Image (cartoon, coloured by chain):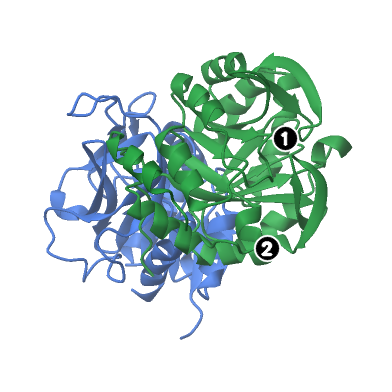
């Protein structure tokens, strides 16, 4: 895939990154369908989520991410049944987000096959919930999901309700605060890039990884293999999530993994 | 092959659904139970576990599961401990306060050192994929629960404590985290342990569960 030569040369000057970069397909769900939008809006139905989940498992995904994209709107999470089904044929870690409001909601999801939960709206409204979740399930189970929208140069605002509602909270302030409260990982979605295939927001990712001592998953904008190379070397992402580029079969995970290994990114080696 | 009956020991902790599904995927009949009758009737027993060691031992003792496990393992029924379940097989653990374990394999459970030999701070818990390597005492995995796996197969870990067995001959596989060597799998006769989650480790993990059923 078209990685510019100049990019490659730049990357070789970077220090060797020793962490294993994870490839995480992101499944945005509405009702029982896999959907995809642009900038978290204009949602289109793609198909049955678990058909895609199984395909990605077979192709060597390191983890899967299920996000109920409209759960916040209706105040519920409809992913339970989907996760129960997925657990019959997908044997890698699964993170579930969207509409988790209470410790009991989280417990229900974790009992039914999920390994981690991703939380955004509920903890923006009530940050103390982070402490309760961490206390009950441990940091390694709690992923803070941030929907970030750029408001000026090197400044991003936290959005909630699936990218629909602004909060006035600065992303960097939010990252510092929630890491102190014990979140184990950050799922960082650029609302501006989401669904555009224009590449990850490198500045946003780098700004967050610079102040984060927990792993950061870059999300939103993956269009080609070199986007991963950039967000890993320049943005210092620990993991990358991708959606429509694989849902529409423009790339598949095996090719993506082979290409990033060629570009000196350390990642899991899959043996069949 | 006749379907193997497997009991996942239920002592109130953890996500047991994924493990049950993984075993069903490879053709086992799985029950989740803490009843003596079920455990005795099954041909394989799995001790799962997520959470803290002292709490787990408390549940196990209250349910008299320790005695049940002693009696079935004496009869050579294969037992597999996973994650905390593996740690519980050891003599004692330093998690919170020093707590006695099942002592089926002698040794102890200690925190993963925060500072690696190379002085770099390790992130604790150790979460993620890591490669399995042969323990020093072994030339290959032929007679172990990893007999169908390849060296450097990657599996999924989530833990803050690690096992240090008294007899290195019980070590089967390690992984390297930072510069720290961590015991990844142990085995003593019919008793087995995996620090990682085979049910979350893709095809490499499924292969391990299959080997356990085929022993």
Identify whether B30 is placed above or below A174: below
> Label 2, label 1: how many angstroms apart (C-alpha)?
25 Å
Question: Which residue is label 1 attached to?
Answer: A104
Q: Chain of mark 2?
A: A
Front residue of B101 and B167 = B167
Identify whether A202 is placed above or below A172: below
Residue at the image position 63 percent from the left and 35 percent from the top: A189
Q: Residues within 10 Å of mark 1 (few under 14, many from 20)?
A: few
Whether residue B49 is visible here, answered yes or no, is no
Tell me the SS state at disc 1.
helix
Question: Which residue is label 2 attached to?
Answer: A50
Residue at the image position 76 percent from the left and 28 percent from the top: A160
Co-location on one chain, circles 2 and 1:
yes
Q: In the picture, which chain is blue?
A: B
Measuring from the top left, give residue B119's x and y in whole percent: 20, 23
Residue B203, label in figure: none
Measuring from the top left, give residue B90's x and y in whole percent: 29, 44
Marked residue nearer the N-terminal end (2 or 1): 2
Q: In the picture, which chain is green?
A: A
Front residue of A196 and A169 = A196
Quarter of the image holding residue B12? top right
Measuring from the top left, give residue A259's x and y in whole percent: 41, 56
Measuring from the top left, give residue A168's x and y in whole percent: 74, 14
Whether residue A175 is visible here, answered yes or no, is yes
Residue at the image position 68 percent from the left and 44 percent from the top: A196
């Amino acid at each position: 895939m078209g990685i510019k030569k100049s990019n490659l040369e730049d990357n070789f000057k970077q220090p060797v990154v020793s962490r294993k970069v994870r490839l995480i397909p992101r499944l945005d769900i509405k009702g029982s369908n896999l959907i995809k939008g642009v900038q978290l809006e204009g949602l289109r139905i793609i198909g049955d989520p678990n058909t895609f989940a199984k395909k990605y498992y077979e192709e060597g995904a390191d983890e899967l991410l299920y996000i109920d994209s409209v759960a916040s709107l209706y105040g519920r999470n409809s992913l339970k049944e989907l996760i129960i089904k997925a657990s019959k044929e997908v044997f890698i870690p699964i993170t579930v987000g969207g509409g988790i409001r209470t410790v009991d909601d989280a417990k229900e999801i974790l009992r039914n096959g999920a390994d981690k939960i991703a939380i955004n709206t509920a903890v923006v409204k009530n940050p103390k919930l982070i402490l309760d979740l961490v206390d009950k399930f441990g940091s390694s189970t709690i992923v803070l999901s941030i929907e970030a929208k750029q408001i000026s140069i090197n400044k991003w605002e936290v959005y909630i309700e699936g990218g629909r509602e602004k909060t006035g909270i600065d992303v960097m302030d939010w990252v510092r605060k929630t890491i102190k409260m014990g979140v184990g990982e950050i799922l960082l979605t650029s609302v501006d890039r989401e669904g555009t295939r224009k590449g990850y927001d490198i500045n946003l990712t780098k700004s967050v990884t610079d102040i984060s001592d927990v792993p950061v998953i870059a999300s939103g904008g993956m269009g080609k293999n070199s986007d991963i190379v950039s967000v890993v070397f320049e943005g210092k992402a620990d993991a990358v999530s991708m959606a429509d580029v694989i849902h529409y079969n423009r790339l598949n995970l095996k090719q993506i993994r082979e290409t990033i290994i060629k570009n000196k990114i350390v990642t899991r080696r899959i043996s069949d | 092959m006749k379907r193997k009956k497997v009991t996942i020991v239920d002592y109130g902790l953890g996500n047991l659904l994924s493990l049950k599904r993984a075993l069903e995927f490879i053709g086992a009949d799985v029950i989740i139970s803490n009843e003596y009758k079920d455990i005795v009737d099954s041909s394989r027993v799995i001790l799962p576990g997520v959470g803290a060691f002292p709490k787990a031992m408390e549940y196990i003792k209250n349910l008299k599961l320790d005695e049940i496990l002693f009696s079935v393992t004496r009869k050579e029924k294969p037992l597999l401990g996973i994650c905390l379940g593996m740690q519980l097989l050891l003599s004692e653990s330093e998690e919170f306060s020093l707590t006695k374990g099942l002592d089926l394999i002698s040794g102890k459970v200690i925190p993963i050192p925060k500072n690696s030999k190379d002085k770099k701070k390790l992130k604790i818990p150790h979460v993620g994929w890591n490669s399995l390597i042969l323990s020093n005492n072994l030339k290959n995995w032929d007679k172990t629960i990893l007999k169908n796996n390849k060296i450097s197969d990657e599996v999924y870990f989530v833990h803050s404590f690690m096992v240090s067995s008294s007899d290195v001959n019980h070590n089967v596989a390690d992984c390297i985290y930072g510069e720290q060597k961590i015991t990844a799998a142990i085995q003593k006769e019919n008793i087995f342990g995996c620090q990682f989650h085979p049910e979350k480790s893709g095809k490499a993990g499924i292969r391990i569960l299959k080997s356990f059923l085929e022993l």
